[in-house]
Amino acid sequence: MSIKYSLHNIDFKKETIAAEDRIKTVVRETPLEYSPALSKLGECRVYLKLENLQKTGSFKLRGAANFVLNLSKKDLDKGVVTVSSGNHAAALTYLSNQFNFKGTIYLPENASTAKVDTLLDYGADLKFYGTDVGDTEFYAKEIAQKNHQTFVPPYNHIKIIAGQATVAMELKNQLKEVDVVFAPIGGGGLASGIAGYLKSVDENIEVIGCLPKNSPVMYESVKAGRIVEMESKPTLSDGTAGGIEKDAITFEICKKYVDDYILISEDEIKKAIILILEKHYMLIEGAAALSVASFIKRKEKFKNKNVVLVISGKKISLDRLKGILCK
């Protein structure tokens, strides 16, 4: 069953403050790093919000922690179920180890080998179904309902969204003057959390959603005024690939608060990964590269502004990295 919310009764600032208080002992405050190379390129001031340095390697720990720590002990004792291309699953597995509850993870059969290996290192209970994360999610929900367990949504729940919004709350504390924020979009949990919170504290901050051309579901949905079903092609940005749940609140939030969308080619993703490796000596995954590539694509628009690029995660397989570097 879809989770339904109304934008009219969501207080983004209140929800984010509550989330920050709930998860502050679990997550890491990530650095906001100035990028001399990108700043010079765009004749502005560019900062990287380094969620690739978060525990478990991505921002996903924030939303998962806020959701899980809001559950009762009775619910946790029954076990929880989730679906993910990797990062949300890693977050939930980490939490299950920290708070001693059982978590079953469903992944698409084409999930990143780097992310699968990491989950196995954590001791995750993994199940595989389908090749599109949307199909995997539908199946996992059916299993959770059948077994009377709680399904932990990857993005479509206010507690998940508010947890991801703590990224924006942190960066506003780290950089008082923010003009524009670039964030990757898949299901929209990160972008809607960031946009919802930032617009609640300063409506003049521009939020730009970044998507791969091979899976631009949120962009096409916003353009159509409704959630659309479309086939996703293979993409280096596997963390943002796949469909959007019917009636997802993230769609409504993105439609209202995200100011613009930029679509990125596979070649542009590759170049952004290489740039961050060369200039910042950091490994980032395809989804994280979307923010960098999107800024580069539109850099002329942001001269003299304070720009924040959300670097959402770091997990990329060695084989995939070799393919990027050796071509």
Image (tube, rainbow, N blue to C red):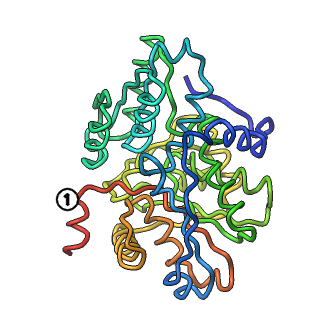
Q: Position of residue 305 (x, y in %)?
A: 68, 79
- Image vertical order of residue 305 relative to residue 150, above or below: below
At x 66%, y 63%, the residue is: 207
Q: Position of residue 16 (x, y in %)?
A: 71, 43
Q: Is residue 254 above or below residue 210?
A: above
- Measured from the top left, where is residue 20 in percent x and y? 67, 43
Q: Which residue is mark 1?
A: 319
Outermost residue on the front side: it is: 25
Determine the secondary structure under disc 1: helix
In percent of width and height, residue 103 lies at: 40, 25
Q: Is residue 178 left or right of residue 138?
A: right
Placement of 84 over or under 281, stated as above or below: above
Which of the 4 image quadrants contains residue 223?
A: bottom right
How crowded pointer 1 is (Cα within 10 Å; few <14, some 14-19, many 20+) is rated as: few
User: For the point 46% across and 57% down, which residue is it?
Assistant: 53
Residue located 50% across and 45% down the image? 60
Q: Amino acid at mark 1?
A: Asp
Q: Is residue 257 left or right of residue 241?
A: right
Q: Which quarter of the picture shows residue 134?
A: top left
- In the rendered structure, the answer to whether residue 159 lies left or right of residue 118 reads right
Q: Quadrant of the C terminus?
A: bottom left
